[in-house]
Image (cartoon, rainbow, N blue to C red):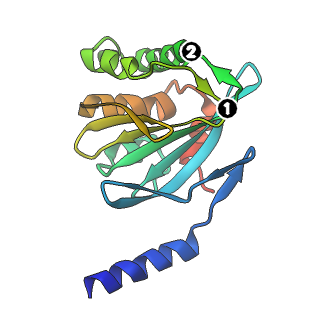
Amino acid sequence: MKKMITVLAFLLISVNVHAVEVAGVTLDPTVSVNDKALTLNGYGIRTKFFFKVYIGALYTAKRVSTPAELLQNTDDKVVRMHFLHSKVEKEKITGAFAEGFANNAPDVAASADAKAFLSFFKSDFIKGDTVDLVLGADGTVAARQNGKVLGTLRSAKLVNAILLIYVGPKPADEGLKKGMLGPR
């Protein structure tokens, strides 16, 4: 009976959720984390000096539309970055993360956890790369590039700090923030 209910729930989700194409990239309607399906909450394009850097997509277990709802949601979450620019040096991304921490979570910015997170990124990103920031309900942070695990650590403060980079009072990109939280 449990399997039948699971299959029925999956079919209902599949009927109501469709892939979305953005800037030539197909965004998955759902992703699986810890054997749970997360649904595309919203997405936007991170731009810098008129260049499209990446598509940022937020996946959640429950729909959220405000930063407060996102931070209070204790379920797993995924921030997925689909790189659009031909090449983005790792120093640019780690610098942007560090700036985001400083602007939105200064208590975490100089922490050992933030430094460990930034050390996960050892190579540049090229067009077509996908980076997942898996933010676990248990405070686990895992970074993956093209499916390969770059690193994992556990820090509930870091989970919130990463989310604040995208949806905090001084987000990396205001349009991206609105897209991740906005209706689609």
- At 56% across and 25% down in the image, what residue appears? 172
**Where residue 68 sits: x, y (%)?**
40, 42
Q: Quadrant of the N terminus?
A: bottom left
Q: Residue furthest front?
A: 148
Vertical relation: 118 (above or below) 39: above
- Give the labeled residue for mark 1: 127
Vertical relation: 6 (above or below) 108: below
Q: Residue furthest bottom?
A: 1
**Where residue 100 sits: x, y (%)?**
47, 20
Q: Judge from the rendering whether residue 50 lies leftward or rightward of residue 182; answer left or right.
A: right
Seen from the viewer's position, the closer of residues 60 and 37 is 37
Q: Quadrant of the C terminus?
A: bottom right
Mark 2 / mark 1, whichever is N-terminal: 2
- At 63% across and 61% down in the image, what residue appears? 19
Vertical relation: 36 (above or below) 113: below
Q: For marks 2 and 1, give the CA distance.
A: 15 Å
- Give the labeled residue for mark 2: 92
Amino acid type, residue under disc 1 in the picture: Lys
- At 35% across and 41% down in the image, what residue appears? 135
Q: Quadrant of residue 17?
A: bottom right
